[in-house]
Amino acid sequence: MARLLVVHHSPTRSTRALLDAALEGARHPDIEGVEVQVVPALEASADDVLAADGYLLGTPANFGYMSGALKHFFDSTFLQVGGALDDSGGAGEGGGGTTAKRPYGLWVHGRYDVTGAVRAVTSIVQALDWKQSAEVLEVVGDVDEAALESATELGGTLAALLA
């Protein structure tokens, strides 16, 4: 059975609502053969990443960046799951490691702007050589019905790719 790993930091009502909607989509009854594993970012391990066939990431945008929890997730798993560093020690181009080419999706919620958070996450997953398999869901301001529908679609899309 394929496994979709959902790594998230959802400390607020808004981010939790997006998570719940994404999980509703990923667990849709028409999608069979996919196990959805949900792990808070501070608890996710390299073993979780290595055992998964695809990834759904969720974070608030804090001070123009991804949450510290999601950053910790990347910091603590990056090299073990196939990340590459360039000569400066920064994230390099596609590592081609064990998890290369696996699909991923991302949602980010911010009060005013999510640009920096999206840029940071996408540069890290580029260095992991994961394949962006859905448009990034960028939610600014209140989480409305349209945002929840988009989150449901995002979760369903990632799960369906693995089915």
Image (tube, rainbow, N blue to C red):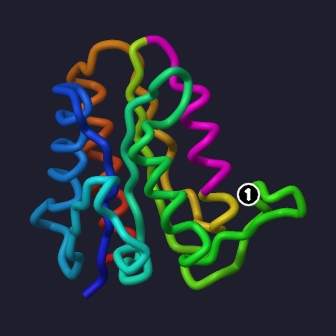
What residue appears at the point 20 percent right and 69 percent down from the top-left corner?
Answer: 31
The answer to whether residue 121 is magenta is yes
* Residue 80: image location, x then y, percent: 55, 78
Name which residue lies at 34% across and 53% down: 41
The quadrant the N terminus occupies is bottom left
Q: Main secondary structure of the magenta part?
A: helix
Where residue 56 sits in the image (x, y, percent)? 38, 56
The image quadrant where one finds the C terminus is bottom left
Q: Please say if 113 is above or below 26.
A: above
Q: Is residue 152 above or below residue 45?
A: above
Label 1: which residue?
91
Report the residue that reaches farthest toward the left. 29
Dot 1 falls on a residue whose secondary structure is loop
- Span shown in magenta: 112-124
Q: Residue at x 58, y 64 (%)?
A: 131
Q: Is 149 one of the magenta-colored residues?
A: no
Relative placement, left or right, of 53 versus 3 is: right
Quadrant hosting residue 145: top left
